[in-house]
Image: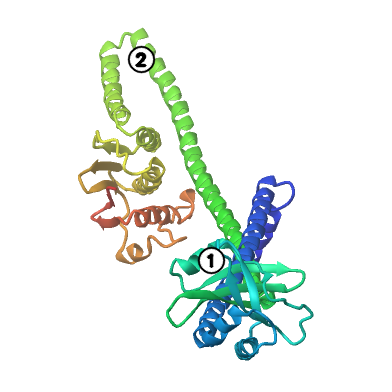
Amino acid sequence: MHRWIEEIMTSTHPKNPRVLIIMLVSSILVLILTCVSIAISYFNTIQSVRLSIANQSMKAASTVADSLDVDAYQEFLRNPVKGTPAYKRIEQQLNQAREQLGLLYLYTIQISEDRQSGRAMIVARPPNAKQTFDIGMPIVLSSKHIQMIYEGSSTYYSDIIRDPNYGVYLSAGAPLRDREGRIIGIIGVDTDVAIVEDIGDDVVRSSIPVFAIQGLFVVVLIFLVLCMERWYQRAIKAAVDETEETYQDELRSVICSMRSIRHDFVNHMQVLYGLIECGYYPKARDYVQSLLKETKLLDLTVRIANPALMVLLHTKWEQAKSKQIVMQFEECSDPIDSIPSIDLIKILSNLIDNAIEAADLADGEKRVSIYFCCDEEHVIFRVENTGPEITPEQRARIFEHGYTTKTEKKYGSRGTGLTIVDAVVHKYKGKIEVWSERGITRFTVWLPVK
């Protein structure tokens, strides 16, 4: 893990602009998302608190409107002068209600005849308020709110108002009705909402740890993405290296086969020329017929439908021929395109190499037989050879990495070929079977068709 971290830190070096761009864009996105989250949280909180205060203010206005002495208020309206018993009665009720409900201002409103504006008639104010209020003083009241009162809405509330004289407040109102239900005015309520901004600031401060965790999560996510990218690059590189190594091995085999064919061709031509030059025509004919048999066998490898397998089988045929081993093929016209060529080559090249090495050790007939075909469910490979048998004990360990049954020094002791075959078979959830009796060994592989 420490090594991976070093590699990731190395990949973020200034010489790697792509990673720097990713990190820069990610950081900008994190900053933008954090700012947006803070703004949304702030405004949602402000809106929630404002609605809560507005509901409380409207309930307070309705409560006062229901409990106010409307007879005294109507008497005051007939003689709107301070100091009268009706004025003092209403002022006392408003002051008591203001203190009980915790309101900033509580007042009665007289609506103009055109229902476009209103005037404050009696105002209950805080004891420390410096402003004085005259009867009939104009107030901030929109015609929209007046229409709401007259059209049946029981209450209204305003947006937050910021006034240099009265501070930050929210207004609400409820209709004031006489005993017959006629609207004779409005009970207005002003509630101090400066606390709303303090609550918003508190919410932002309390949200900082959450936003920090979100930022940390994004950083960890970026780190994991870089780790996955690095792992993916390593996996791709390993697969490419493995494929390149396989094809380089087969390319070297093809080059060796071409050299061998050229060498054999020159030798055959020299022999034929000598036989014809000396007049041994029957022997020359027999020699050509023997060459035709080899050519027919070689032609079979050329007629394999899968190009990669065709090249592989041809090179292996040349290798077997150089060791005086007879290699037999059963023709397959199916291209076997359901399995990648690289995996086909891994399976067959290792099985055939082992078969050639084993057949080379046979005391009698030296033979390798290769068969492969396709049906609706499986691709089947079978490689059979003469030579030393594989004991049950050896079969139990034959697919272990590093284990080998080879004893001849000329073949080395790699012990990796069958491990590779077994890995490919397991990759496709296939099956491999080993049979070895009476001087014959057979490997059979079944791979499910995708």
Q: Residue furthest left?
A: 376
The x and y percentages for residue 400 are 42, 62
Measure the C-alpha gap from mark 2 to mark 1. 122 Å
Quick check: 314 above or below 91? above
Report if residue 7 is visible in the image.
no
Q: Which mark is residue 146?
A: 1
Q: Which mark is residue 272?
A: 2
The x and y percentages for residue 369 are 27, 42
Tell whether label 1 touches label 2 (CB within 8 Å): no
Q: Amino acid at mark 2?
A: Leu
Q: Nearer the viewer, residue 45 or 272?
A: 45
Q: Nearer the viewer, residue 180 or 401?
A: 180
In the rendered structure, the answer to whether residue 261 lies left or right of residue 108 reads: left
Answer few, some or many: residues within 10 Å of disc 2's Cα (few below 14, many 20 plus, some between 14 and 19): some
Q: How is the image coloured?
A: rainbow
- Dividing the picture into quarters, in which one does residue 423 lie? bottom left
In the rendered structure, the answer to whether residue 305 lies left or right of residue 316 reads: left
Q: Nearer the viewer, residue 220 or 261?
A: 220
The x and y percentages for residue 307 are 36, 32
